[in-house]
Amino acid sequence: MQAAQYADLDGLALAEMLANKEVNSAQLMECALQLAEERGAPLRALVHLRPEQARQEAAHWQARGPFGGIPFLLKDSGLASRRFPSNLGSRLFADIEYAYDATLAERFDAAGLIPFGRSTVSELCMGPSTESSVHGGPTINPRANDRSTGGSSGGAAAAVAAGIVPVAHGSDGGGSIRIPAACNGVFGLKPSRGRVPMGPARGEGWGGMACDGVITRSVRDTAAALDAISGYASGAPYAAPPRPGSYLDAVREQGAGRLRIAVWRDAFNGIPIADSCRQALEDTARLCRELGHEVVDGPLPDFDYGAFVRAHGTVLATNIVLAVDARLAVLGRALRDDDLEPVIRDGLDIGRGIAATQYVDAIQRFHAIGRALSQAMQGVDLVLSPTLTQLPARLGELALTGGFWAFREKVSRYATFLAFVNASGRPAASLPVAATPDGVPLACQLIGHFGREDQILRLAAQIERAAPWPAHAVTLPGR
């Protein structure tokens, strides 16, 4: 198989070729490694590559799971894997080694996904643009080189968009799957809280806001991956409702049933939405009507958005303190001036001054948002909104520079429709529905009821079939 052919296929198409013995895992890995060098390196999308280890593993791979044995990337988010170290996009956290595999890493393995490295992230996964200085420069968007790949799963989305892998691990604590999916013109679903395991070393992330999943080019690949990795792990503090059936079977159904879909055309606090993002929303709403669904105007959930932004920042800042202090204790030294990006360093100082009562209040606000969103979605199956309020940010606009609270305010005006969904625990997905005349990706978000990823995936697959995602050329910097 040639790398160009490999790069055009989704994961299940490659798995079918494996099952038919038209290709083997070692040949697929060679394609991925070639593209990692030719595309991943100039995009600065990959870290901790282990090519010889991956070649050996692929050569002796025993076919299993829905993907059979295709190349894959783990996010550099600290997901424990004995295969690779991690640095969480930070100098301070460089080269953390693991003596065990996380439950999710084991499930990826059982799904037939062979990781050969990790994808780049913003420092501590706390920025909506992957521009960590530890990478030697920003991760470059293969669709628009002067624009952000998004974050924190920016390297994962760039790698999928560039054809290096069809499926990549992502995580989302405030939009970190959906932002990069939107910026790179690929598909990304944030599952319900408790749907995908986080153990065994931890039970939750960021007060229950964080979850793991995948970024893909096709809806069916996400469905197959979610079938493989979802399910309660003993001892976990959260459990999503049992899935109603196979997600892959759901997306294969030609009809999604007649759904009632609410559209959110305005943002909280009068935050402006770019005309191009509004047009993508209107076009997607019209397509939903043409597919036979009922589309209505829906109210935004009733909560104080500004207070939520502060609560989200409070939880992030306290987690910075926890992570940094634990790392410094392992290293046996004090913090150095160049250990952290400016926003994270300021967040550390802020976090040290946050009282326990402020943290508890933040968690209670998250729970109240879950109730408010439940009220706003009464009588509808799904909500359709813009993913981002603006086009993918220009490089530098959302770098981790300046003060913590000023940065969080910028993020809140850019990813306005995302983080509060994490607070609610509900599933949501970003669909790459359109592009500007000069090829910049545009996306819309679908928000579902708790535990109803199947409804999101059904409708997303319907939209994908009726109006296939825009075709994008891969552009490398300097070429």
Image: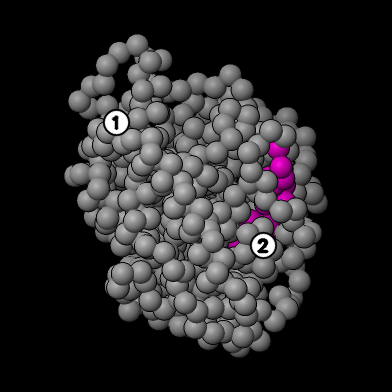
Number of other residues with Cα within 10 Å of mark 2, as a class: few under 14, some 14 to 19, many 20 or more: many
Residue farthest to the top, as pictured: 332
Q: Residue lying farthest front?
A: 357
Residue in the image at 79% along x and 49% along y: 19
Whether residue 431 is visible to the viewer of this picture, yes or no, is: no
Q: Which residue is mark 2?
A: 452
Quickly name the residue at label 1.
Answer: 352
- State the image coordinates of residue 297 (x, y, percent, origin top left): 49, 83
SS at badge 2 = loop
Q: Label 1 crowding class (10 Å Cα cut-off): few <14, some 14-19, many 20+?
A: few
Q: Earlier in the sequence, mark 1 or mark 2?
A: 1
Q: Which range is magenta?
A: 217-233
Amino acid at circle 1: Arg
Q: Nearer the viewer, residue 208 or 391?
A: 208
Asked if residue 406 lies left or right of residue 183, the reply is left
Q: Position of residue 247 (x, y in %)?
A: 73, 59
Magenta-span inclusion, residue 222:
yes
Q: Is residue 42 magenta?
A: no
Tell me the quarter of the picture where residue 65 sits: top right
Q: Quadrant of residue 62?
A: top right
